Structures are given as C-alpha cells and as structure tokens.
Image (cartoon, rainbow, N blue to C red):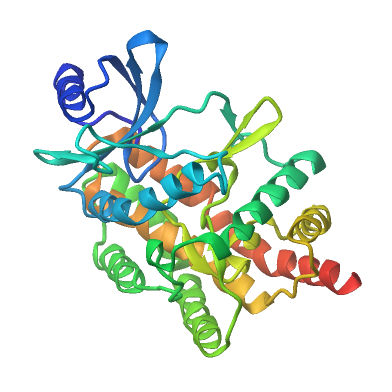
C-alpha cells in the first residue's frame, strides 16, 4: 500500500506489544505491496521484525487475512523442520497464535530478512535465473515431507471473472466519471474491453482442459516474482507465501518463459534431478489468469476500495505498464519456451 493505514503508530505499537510481548520500541511504515500494509518493527536489543497489517473492512485484504491460517503453519513447518529455511516465517503471539486481531485489523509478524528484493533487477542475469531455478526446485522437493492438510490443492480458480465483467460494465455505463482516477481508468481500459473478454473466454477454455487433464502436484510458492525474492550475501530468501498451494509445477515456472528460459529450465531440471515435461496450455492458463486476476484487483481498487489518490495512481500505472502492455508477449514467449523445451 502506498499510504499507511489510519491507525496511530503509538496505538499500533501498544497493541503489538500486548499481543507479542517482545518489547517493541518503534515501527516504520513501508510503502509496498497491495494486499496488506507493511511495517518494519523494531524491538529491544536491536531485534527487527516485518509486520503485515490487514484492513478487515477491505474485502481483498480480508480475504488475504483469511489465508493466514493456511500458509503461516506451512512456512513455520518448512523452517522449523529444516525443509526450506530461506524464507519468511511467522512469529507466534504470546499465546501461541499465528496472528493477532484487534478492532478492525489483523496483524501477522515475521522474521526480518535483510537485503534487497529483485523487483528492480529485471531483466535477470543468467546467474540470478539459475539461483531462482535452484530455489524453485528446492521448494518442489519439500512436497513429500508436507502434511497435506497444511495446504489447499489447485482448483484452477477463476472466481474473479464476475468482478471483472461487472467492472467493465460499470466503466461502459458511465459516459464520464467526476472522479479523475476513475475517468482515467475508463479511458485506459475501455478500449481494450473486447480483447479482455476474448482473453477471459480463452482462460475459461484453458481451465476446462486443465481440470480434465491429470497432472503431477507439488508445492508451489505461487507468486515467485522478483519482488518476493530477497538477495542477501549471495543467498536467496523467499517471502510472501500467501499464494502457496499444491499445484502442477507449471505454476512456479510460467513467470520464467521467454528469454533466459533455457538457462532457467536447465538448472531447474538439474536440481529436481529429472527431465520435466511441461504442459504449455497450463503455462498459458497461468499467464493469462495472472494478468486478468491482477487487472480485476486493480479495477476493484480504483472503483471501490481505494481511499487515497496515491494508491489510485499506483494502480493505474500497474494496469498500464505491468499488465495490459504484456499481453501481446505471452504467445511469443510460450512459443520460445516450447522451442527450448523441444530442443533438449
């Protein structure tokens, strides 16, 4: 989030101290992410933690908070059983709970990982691609040691489609919005309406194929982009496990098709210890679903959720430069990755 939640730092600090009992001295807001508010928490003796605050009046953040009970036990399990330790894991409350809820918010506390994310490191070097492939394979290899009850299994969810169609209808029904951000959104998105509906139809068709085709299921992080990877002393650490799920391995591979996929795939197969067969229709499903689901979230933000223009501006930028401008590259990247896989 671009602007901090409407709670005084002193009040939040008091509530965190009450919940966690770790002698918190101060907190600093971090303008990042879009599914929760982020803070660095400073404790006694130089300790630092990372906190995510969820506004329970915001439907998207409320859904994110509901996922905590699923992925926090997973990351705790991965770390404390030494299955995969380069990750953000939860700090339990003084009563042994995974998170704290008070008034209109839920807060989860995590270990603090020093270092820079790879959000601004694109295009990735070959060395970084190899490291990410190694990390992706390491996550996959934990699958046999996990309790199936810890995670949901892939259902190829596209429940966002009704919200997407409703947002497009609202944009079309208004000749002009009085709100500057909403009008800018209308002018940006409405000319692409027919294409968006065409892509939504394609996603439905690809989902039908996926549901009817059996696939290997492994642990996937689900959102393994540069912003969720921290590089520290040549080690990679993975944060934000909200989308973690038991799913086909393509779910963690689709973000790396295109240029550099040969480097990524070679290292991935080396660390997995076997040649992998890739379902490129699944790759296409995950590519298009991600973009349409992200578009839906940003549409909903601007039309219904956002309370600050800075957040509107951020979401408009994301739609223009991190979403709609990338659709034309999906099929060429899939073709490139397919050619690379076929040459092995």
In the rendered view, tell whether residue 303 sits above or below residue 277. Answer: above
- The quarter of the picture where residue 139 lies is bottom right
Please say whether residue 259 is visible from this viewpoint: no
Please say whether residue 302 is visible from this viewpoint: yes
Seen as rendered, the residue at the extreme front is: 81
> Which residue occupies the foreground of this view, 98 or 294?
98
In the rendered view, tell whether residue 126 sits above or below residue 233. Answer: below
Residue at the image position 53 percent from the left and 90 percent from the top: 212
Residue at the image position 84 percent from the left and 66 percent from the top: 340
Residue at the image position 51 percent from the left and 72 percent from the top: 195
Percent across and percent down for residue 29 are 33, 23
Percent across and percent down for residue 243 are 44, 56
Percent across and percent down for residue 97 are 24, 42
Left or right, 281 with respect to 200, comes to right
- The quarter of the picture where residue 341 lies is bottom right
Residue at the image position 77 percent from the left and 46 percent from the top: 130
Image quarter (top left, top right, bottom left or bottom right) of the N terminus:
top left
In the rendered view, tell whether residue 138 sits above or below residue 257. Answer: above
In the rendered view, tell whether residue 212 sits above or below residue 147. Answer: below
């Amino acid at each position: 989030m671009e602007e901090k939640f409407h709670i005084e730092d002193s009040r939040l600090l008091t509530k965190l101290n009450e919940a966690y009992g770790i002698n918190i001295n101060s907190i600093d807001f971090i303008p990042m992410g879009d599914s929760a508010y982020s803070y660095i928490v400073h404790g006694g003796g130089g300790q630092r933690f990372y906190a995510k605050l969820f506004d329970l009046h915001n439907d998207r953040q409320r859904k994110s908070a509901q996922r905590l009970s699923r992925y926090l036990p997973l990351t705790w399990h991965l770390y404390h059983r030494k299955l995969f330790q380069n990750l953000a894991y939860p700090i339990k409350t003084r009563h042994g709970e995974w998170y704290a809820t008070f008034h209109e918010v839920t807060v989860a506390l995590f270990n603090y990982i020093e270092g820079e994310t790879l959000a601004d490191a694109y295009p990735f070097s070959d060395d970084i691609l190899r490291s990410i492939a190694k990390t992706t394979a390491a996550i996959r290899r934990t699958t046999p040691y996990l309790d199936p009850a810890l995670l949901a299994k892939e259902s190829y969810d596209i429940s966002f489609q009704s919200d997407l169609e409703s947002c497009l209808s609202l944009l079309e029904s208004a000749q002009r919005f009085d709100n500057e951000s909403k009008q800018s959104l209308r002018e940006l998105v409405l000319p692409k309406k027919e294409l968006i509906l065409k892509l939504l139809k394609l996603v439905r068709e690809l989902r039908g194929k996926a549901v009817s085709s059996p696939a290997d299921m492994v642990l996937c992080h689900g959102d393994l982009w540069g912003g969720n990877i921290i590089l520290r002393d040549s080690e990679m650490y993975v944060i934000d496990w909200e989308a973690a799920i038991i799913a086909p391995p393509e779910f963690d591979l689709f973000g790396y098709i295109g240029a550099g996929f040969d480097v990524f795939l070679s290292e991935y197969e080396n660390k997995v210890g076997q040649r992998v067969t890739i379902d490129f229709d699944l790759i296409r499903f995950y590519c298009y679903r991600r973009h349409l689901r992200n578009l839906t979230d940003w549409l909903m933000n601007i039309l219904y959720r956002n309370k600050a223009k800075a957040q509107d501006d951020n979401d408009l930028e994301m739609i223009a430069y991190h979403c709609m401008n990338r659709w034309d590259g999906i099929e060429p990247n899939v073709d490139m990755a397919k050619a690379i896989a076929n040459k092995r």
